[in-house]
Amino acid sequence: MANFSFDIVSDYDLAKVTNAVEQSQRDIGNRYDFKGTSARLEFVDDKKGVKIIGDSQFHLDSIIEILRKKLAGAGVSQKILDTSSEPITSNLKTTWTVTFKKGLDQDNAKKITKLIRDELPKVKTQIQGEEIRVTSQKKDELQIAMQTIRETDLDFPIEFTNFR
């Protein structure tokens, strides 16, 4: 009997993220409440994150909200935004560096494999670096595993690839 499988990865489509950031930059330039301020959004570290610059915390919150809406419109999970760093204020400007989360670390991979093993004992999981291979003899079991993972509230983005 044939084995079916898929991979679980924590990744994002760079083209969609780039498009969302560029749309956000245009929106910021067009908004009346940002005219004459230092409010802007720019890429950092070769598109591995963004730097949000504003005159106050209110500007930062408004800009991140614009970015979240554009990401949602592009079908990208907002969980890629790592907002754990603190904004820095100096010279009447506030800057906030928000990186993009990518890749499953060991703890998150173990959390997912434990979840699948507890719910579906016949489904096999295997951690392979920054991804998890899930195999089963029935496609239905893999569909249930995917649904179980989608319904679980994880604090990192996940995608399913290589469904065979």
Image (cartoon, grey):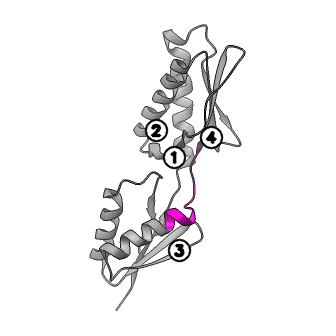
Q: Residue at x 34, y 85 (%)?
A: 137
Task: Describe the element under mark 3 as helix, strand or loop.
Answer: strand
Q: Mark 2 or mark 3, which has the lower sequence index?
A: 2
Q: Is residue 3 left or right of residue 151?
A: right
Q: Which residue is mark 4?
A: 49
Amino acid type at mark 1: Ile
* Mark 1 vs mark 2, CA separation in Å: 10 Å
Q: Which residue is mark 1?
A: 80
Q: Mark 4 or mark 1, which has the lower sequence index?
A: 4
**Residue 122 within the segment the image draws in magenta:** no
Q: Mark 1 or mark 2, which has the lower sequence index?
A: 2
* Residue 56 image position (x, y, % from top left): 57, 17
Q: Which residue is mark 2?
A: 71
Amino acid type at mark 4: Gly
Q: Mark 3 or mark 1, which has the lower sequence index?
A: 1
Mark 2 neighbour class, 10 Å CA radius: few under 14, some 14 to 19, many 20 or more: many
Q: Residue at x 50, y 21 (%)?
A: 27
147, above or below 102, in the image:
below
Task: Describe the element under mark 1 as helix, strand or loop.
Answer: helix
Q: Which residue is mark 3?
A: 127
120, above or below 152, in the image:
below
